[in-house]
Image: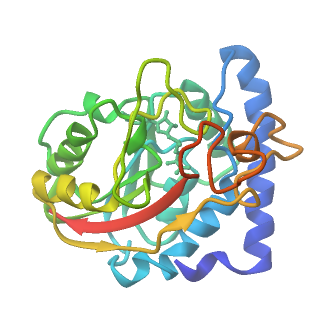
Amino acid sequence: MDSLTTQSEQSTIVDIIKLLAAAALLIGGLFGYYYYLELSLPLRVLMVLGGFGSGVAMAMTSMQGKMILDVGCGNGYYSLRMQGDGAKSVIGIDPSMLFMMQFKAIMHFMQSVPVFLLPLKLEELPCNTPIFDTAFSMGVLYHQRSPLEHLNQLYGALKKNGELILETIIFPGNDTYFRNENGRYAQMPNVWHLPNIKELYSWLKMTGFKNIKKGRIEITTTDEQRSTEWMTSHSLSNALDPVNKKLTIEGFPAPHRIIIACNK
Ligand SMILES: C[S@@+](CC[C@H](N)C(=O)[O-])C[C@H]1O[C@@H](n2cnc3c(N)ncnc32)[C@H](O)[C@@H]1O
């Protein structure tokens, strides 16, 4: 997990992102839509995967020889990194056809590797098929109308003692966020529920997860999540209060992200 820090790897990441962006522009025209707010991948990669050093590394067992499920895999960037870190095979699932096409474009230029992306939602996988050693759900939980159901499905996909790596947004303090009619959080219309840390723990325990370990809670910065020449749409800075960056434009606490590792 600490293999993301060399300059040559960072420039490879940038090259891959440029290629992905070019593919997105090409294919986006065909499919007519794309996700805009959450595309600052290189820095999220550095934070989330490199950031295991700051949080989950202490908790997470190695990828070596593992059968991995990457839920909400986007264009498969992390899935490929997981395989690069020694996973036996990775299955990434995401309902976005645009991301599937980006992955296909990348794979055209790569040697064949045991990473497979399927255009599916987690709830479309067969229930209770416990075949994975590790399941990742990064940036997905808060997009679910029923977060408990999402956790339940992750639980059902894991082998006994299998490991869940959950990356999500929480609310600081004791409050929680529930989406009300036409509500938005940081301008996102599809954020349904943001638990506080205690509530998230109780969801995980209710689902049956044990051995729950949390990484650091990070406030997402506008350096990390930002518009670039490759992603010119609105980004986090447009979603924050222009005067008080600790608040979203709607007046909620700005996004606090956490990584949790736990076992079935
Ligand atoms: C914020 S992006 C996160 C992408 C990637 N995991 C990351 O951390 O950068 C959320 C992704 O989850 C996908 N997604 C949302 N609900 C899902 C579900 N029920 N099952 C699988 N993927 C889902 C979306 O299509 C989107 O690509």
Residue 42 occupies quadrant: bottom right
Q: Which residue is found at the position 54% from the left and 30% from the top? A: 184
Q: Is residue 102 above or below residue 196?
A: above
Which one is in front, 217 or 109?
217
Q: Position of residue 223 (x, y in %)?
A: 76, 60
Q: Which residue is found at the position 47% from the left and 48% from the top? A: 139
Which one is in front, 111 or 160?
160
Q: Which residue is found at the position 60% from the left and 68% from the top? A: 47
**In the rendered view, does 27 fall on the left or right side of 248?**
right
Residue 75 occupies quadrant: top right
**The C terminus sits in image quarter:** bottom left
| Residue farthest to the right, as pictured | 229
Which one is in front, 53 or 126?
53
Q: Position of residue 220 (x, y in %)?
A: 62, 59
Q: Position of residue 21 (x, y in %)?
A: 77, 40
Q: Position of residue 79 (x, y in %)?
A: 49, 54
Q: Is residue 17 above or below residue 224?
A: above
**In the rendered view, does 198 fall on the left or right side of 47?**
left
**In the rendered view, does 198 fall on the left or right side of 101?**
left
Asked which colour scheme the image uses, the reply is rainbow
**In the rendered view, does 195 fall on the left or right side of 72?**
left
Q: How many marks?
A: 0
Residue 48 occupies quadrant: bottom right
Q: Which residue is found at the position 55% from the left and 32% from the top? A: 100
Which one is in front, 3 or 211?
211
